[in-house]
Image (cartoon, grey):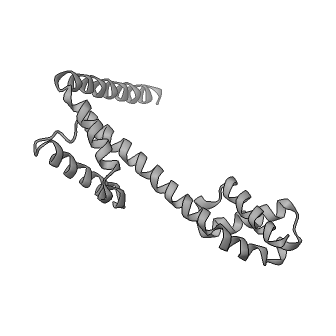
Amino acid sequence: MSADWAQELDECLDDWEMRVRGAREEQTRFPHLKQWGQHLYQALVDDDQFMAAETPQDQDSRGGHLARSMFGPDCPIHSHDIQCALANARAKRAEILLQRQRAQWQAAIPAWAAQLATSPGFQQGTTAQRAMLASNLLYAHHPMADTPDLVRLLRTAAADLLA
């Protein structure tokens, strides 16, 4: 059993080494791809269609289309630098969308606070109980909305309405 595990590990390491060697060779032979990747990253982050793409396949499709329109139909979209640009743009997209969503949740705090302030459990609860009620309300709207900052903001806003 351990021989199989060692062989599998050896194959994984060989595969990784080949990919690293291939990326280095690509960067040596085509130094312009790094700059293309940087330009593509910024273009994707600024692209409304990429930001609106729901699935990774749609994002890849838009990234490939944009790369070919920027750098020509024979653009090596599977190159290391182009793929890194796409992956980094996906991560930035997620970050931007989460920031936008958090801003929407913060804008909804006054309405949620009014709803929370009218609940009997909140009116009579301790600070910890109020925080739990605020957390539950946020989680009911969206699990990612249940953050310490938003819980504190909601609990404080609802308490201010009672004062």
Residue 130 in percent (x, y) is at 81, 65
Image side of residue 31 versus residue 97, left or right: left
Residue 50 in percent (x, y) is at 31, 55
Question: Which residue does the image show at 15% across and 49% down from the upper left?
Answer: 69
Residue 133 in percent (x, y) is at 76, 67
Outermost residue, left side? 73
Please say if 1 is above or below 158.
Answer: above
Image side of residue 51 versus residue 135, left or right: left
Question: Which residue does the image show at 83% across and 64% down from the upper left?
Answer: 129
Residue 21 in percent (x, y) is at 27, 22
Q: Quadrant of residue 149?
A: bottom right
Image side of residue 141 versus residue 34, left or right: right
Please say if 143 is above or below 12.
Answer: below
Q: Camera-side residue: 69 or 62?
A: 69
Q: How many marks?
A: 0
Q: Camera-side residue: 58 or 104?
A: 104
On-image quarter of the C terminus: bottom right
Q: Quadrant of residue 155?
A: bottom right
